[in-house]
Image (tube, rainbow, N blue to C red):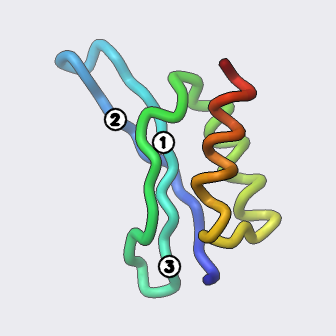
Amino acid sequence: MNCKYVLIRDTYNDKNSVKFGIAAIDDSGNIIAEAHDVSENEDKVIELIHRCNKLELSSIHFFEVVSDFINACA
């Protein structure tokens, strides 16, 4: 399935803590998958999003890629 990946910003503890995630959006603008709390590093998540969009990552592989990213950053 073709989709576009976008940034999610989650704010916790009265805006003292921010974490970033990724959402997969289909051609109709519906969220088909999302991963919250991927990283506190916005630039790294944005870089991952750019790669996913550039390589036209299938939503089938979305959670596997996010998991690999989280494990690589740990």
**Could you say which is closer to the camera, residue 40 or residue 71?**
71
Q: Residue at x 79, y 63 (%)?
A: 54
Quarter of the figure with residue 32: bottom left
**SS of the residue under disc 2:** strand
Q: Which mark is residue 21?
A: 1
The furthest residue to the right: 55
What's under tag 1, amino acid-wise? Gly
In the image, residue 67 above or below residue 42: below
Of all residues shown, which one is farthest toward the left? 14
**Amino acid type, residue under disc 2 in the picture:** Asp
Q: Between disc 1 and disc 3, whose residue precedes?
A: 1
Q: Position of residue 2 (x, y in %)?
A: 63, 81
The CA span between labels 2 and 1 is: 8 Å
Q: CA distance from mark 2 to mark 3?
A: 21 Å
Which residue corresponds to mark 2? Answer: 10
Residue 13 position by quadrant: top left
Determine whether, in the image, residue 54 is placed left or right of residue 40: right
Q: Residue furthest bottom?
A: 28
Give the labeled residue for mark 3.
26
Tell me where residue 3 appears, x and y as whole percent. Answer: 59, 75
- Quarter in which the N terminus is drawn: bottom right
